[in-house]
Amino acid sequence: MRLDFLSRGDALLLVDVQNDFCPGGALAVPGGDEVIPVLNRWIRAAEEAGIPVYASRDWHPENHVSFTGRGGPWPPHCVRGTRGAEFHPGLEIPGGLFVINKATDPDRDAYSAFDGTGLAARLHRSGVRRLFVGGLATDYCVKATVLDALREGFTVHVITDGIRAVEVKEGDGRRALDEMSEAGAVLAESP
Ligand code: VGL
Ligand code: ZN
């Protein structure tokens, strides 16, 4: 794949490509693992272009407020230090990957990779202006991350073949794409 439009000031941001969001995981996103070969091509392209790769992970304590046991909407998932919280083993993690742990506070959920992580400052400081975003899930953490990135002033490209939706309600994925597009994100399939 030719991705030679990647250049200085760009970064790849992978959202929550973790075992628990893939088939067999605690909060499996339908077809979640299908993003992996797509995102691996982007990782290789980023390495070739010399642009940084960031990867967020949902990193909950075991008593997290989003879990059903505490009245939250989700089954326990991505408990820090467990296999479910690890990046999917098929993801070809590059050397020098920047890892962002999020939703680590037991009493507060955080869908966006920018929420409470210091990511925006880090990206600005590194001279990043444009983000290419893929991962899981379209209608939760990808959407929240993309909307925050736009608010923070980044140009944002959503890799539409590198995301999958939970679809608690049918159409949630489509609606999330519309929302991201209306907010100013560029939606584009991998070339
Ligand atoms: C996510 C539900 C709960 C996500 C995280 O990464 O999209 N979804 N926690
Ligand atoms: Zn979560």
Image (spheres, rainbow, N blue to C red):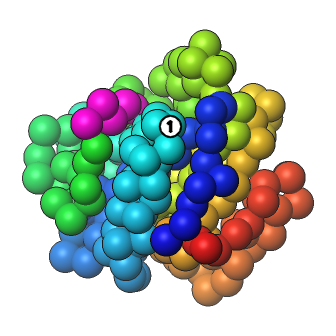
The answer to whether one can see residue 90 in this image is yes
Residue at horizontal 19 percent and vertical 76 percent from the top = 24
Disc 1: CA contacts within 10 A as few (<14), some (14-19) or many (>=20): some
Residue under label 1, please give it: 51
Q: What stretch is highlighted in magenta?
A: 95-101
Residue at horizontal 57 percent and vertical 60 percent from the top = 3
Above or below, 181 against 61 in this view is below
- Residue situated in front as seen by the camera: 147 or 171: 147
Taking the magenta stretch, the answer to whether it contains residue 89 is: no
Quadrant position of the C terminus in the picture: bottom right
- Residue situated in front as seen by the camera: 158 or 128: 128
- Residue situated in front as seen by the camera: 108 or 3: 3
User: Which amino acid, by three-letter code, is at mark 1?
Assistant: Ile
Name the image quarter holding residue 189. Answer: bottom right
The answer to whether one can see residue 76 in this image is no
Please, what secondary structure does the residue beneath circle 1 have?
A: loop
Expressed as whole percent of the image width and height from the top left, the position of residue 47 reads 40, 45
Above or below, 115 against 79 in this view is above
Count of all numbered marks drawn on residues in the image:
1
Expressed as whole percent of the image width and height from the top left, the position of residue 184 reads 86, 52
Residue at horizontal 62 percent and vertical 41 percent from the top = 7
Left/right placement of residue 101 relative to residue 46 reads left
Expressed as whole percent of the image width and height from the top left, the position of residue 173 reads 63, 75
